[in-house]
């Protein structure tokens, strides 16, 4: 564990320098991920997995504690004693006992210059709800934006447009990295082999990171203690195949990241469609899952035996740091 801690603190220190460099690069309107001026890109450590086995092994062991049914099928985010849930066209807020305390059934009613109709996985930072929103029609997404809602009223506060030159063609989830003041978006489509980084304050595009190997059908993203976690709907519910949580660390200045299979979700009520995830302040992982509906090309299409509607459920997992457990 000592080795891991020192590596982590070193990363945080180097990260501060890298952010300054990336911001300087952004001022020249040259996204760092597109290469170009290599002198502005800090030296990157070896990305060989054998040099960093901790990058490709799970960081935590997870024990399922329970689940709660919620009113949205897309995303989950936790801060303090509250949990926020997104549906495709709704935002809701729950207290620690899963009582619904606020909801917005018309989150697109006002404040948008570009038409949108879809929210993916969400995040909450300083009582503001970060949503990746888009116009999703016939399997094609456009008008991708970062939308920020008030954590209490669930009313829209501000939006940032995405950078089309990033190549991102869908937004399935979003997360805030408070350690370096960035916002990250993921995609459910082929462009999901990348995650896309923006400045938390200005919304400026800062570049993209390619994931090796790339999870397929990424549905959600969250940041926790130096690492990013993504969910992927890569298990076929017809065959009771589990979906997965993956983890990666975006090294300062790196354009690619080694991906770990963090958790195989073989202990949910019934296999279905994994969606968003989040980490609570008291150290639990929350994962939103849909079950009951057959999903064909990302759309609910009929039901499995025993179901007449789709159930949206948040599973709560206790976490044990595997490096600390090994030391003990
Ligand atoms: Ca989704
Ligand atoms: Ca699945």
Image: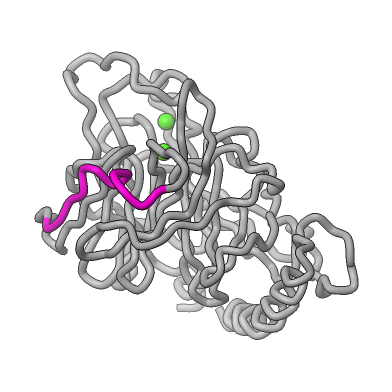
Residue 73: x and y in percent read 30, 38
Nearer-the-camera pick, 179 or 237? 179
Residue 226: x and y in percent read 54, 71
- Residues rendered magenta in the picture: 101-112
Residue 59: x and y in percent read 51, 63
Residue extending farthest front: 113
Nearer-the-camera pick, 134 or 2? 134
Q: Is residue 55 above or below residue 90?
A: below
Location of the N terminus by quadrant is bottom right
Location of the C terminus by quadrant is bottom left
Residue drawn at point x = 42 percent, y = 39 percent: 116
- Is 56 a magenta residue? no
Residue drawn at point x = 81 percent, y = 74 percent: 42
Q: Is residue 97 above or below residue 192?
A: below
Q: Is residue 271 above or below residue 231?
A: above
Confirm whether residue 212 shows in the render. Answer: no
Nearer-the-camera pick, 186 or 26? 26
Left or right for 201, reference 70? right
Left or right for 200, reference 269? right
Residue drawn at point x = 45 percent, y = 69 percent: 321
Q: How many marks?
A: 0
Confirm whether residue 175 shows in the render. Answer: yes
Image quadrant of ligand 1? top left
Residue 89 lies in quadrant? top left
Residue 118 lies in quadrant? top left
Residue 127: x and y in percent read 30, 70
């Amino acid at each position: 564990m000592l080795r891991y801690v020192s590596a982590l603190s070193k990363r945080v220190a180097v990260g501060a320098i890298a952010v300054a460099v990336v911001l300087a690069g952004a001022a020249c309107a040259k996204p760092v991920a597109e290469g170009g001026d290599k002198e502005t890109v800090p030296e990157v450590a070896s990305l060989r997995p054998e040099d960093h086995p901790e990058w490709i092994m799970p960081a935590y062991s997870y024990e399922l504690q329970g689940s709660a049914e919620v009113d949205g099928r897309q995303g989950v985010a936790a801060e303090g004693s509250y949990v926020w849930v997104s549906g495709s066209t709704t935002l809701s807020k729950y207290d620690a006992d899963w009582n619904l305390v606020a909801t917005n059934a018309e989150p697109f009613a006002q404040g948008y210059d570009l038409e949108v109709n879809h929210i993916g996985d969400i995040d909450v930072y300083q009582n503001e709800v970060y949503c990746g929103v888009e116009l999703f029609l016939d399997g094609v997404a456009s008008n991708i934006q970062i939308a920020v809602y008030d954590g209490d009223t669930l009313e829209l506060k501000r939006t940032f447009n995405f950078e089309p030159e990033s190549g991102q063609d869908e937004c399935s989830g979003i997360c805030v990295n408070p350690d370096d003041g960035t916002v990250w978006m993921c995609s459910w489509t082929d462009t999901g082999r990348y995650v896309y980084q923006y400045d938390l304050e200005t919304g400026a595009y800062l570049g993209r990171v390619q994931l090796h190997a790339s999870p397929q059908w990424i549905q959600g993203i969250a940041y926790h203690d130096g690492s990013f976690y993504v969910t992927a709907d890569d298990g076929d519910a017809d065959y009771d195949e589990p979906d997965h949580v993956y983890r990666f660390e975006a090294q300062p200045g790196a354009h690619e990241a080694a991906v770990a299979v963090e958790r195989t979700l073989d202990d949910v009520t019934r296999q279905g469609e994994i969606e968003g995830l989040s980490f609570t302040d008291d150290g639990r992982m929350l994962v939103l899952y849909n079950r009951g509906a057959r999903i064909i090309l990302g759309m609910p299409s009929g039901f499995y035996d025993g179901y007449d509607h789709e159930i949206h459920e948040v599973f709560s997992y206790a976490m044990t740091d595997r490096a600390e457990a090994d030391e003990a």
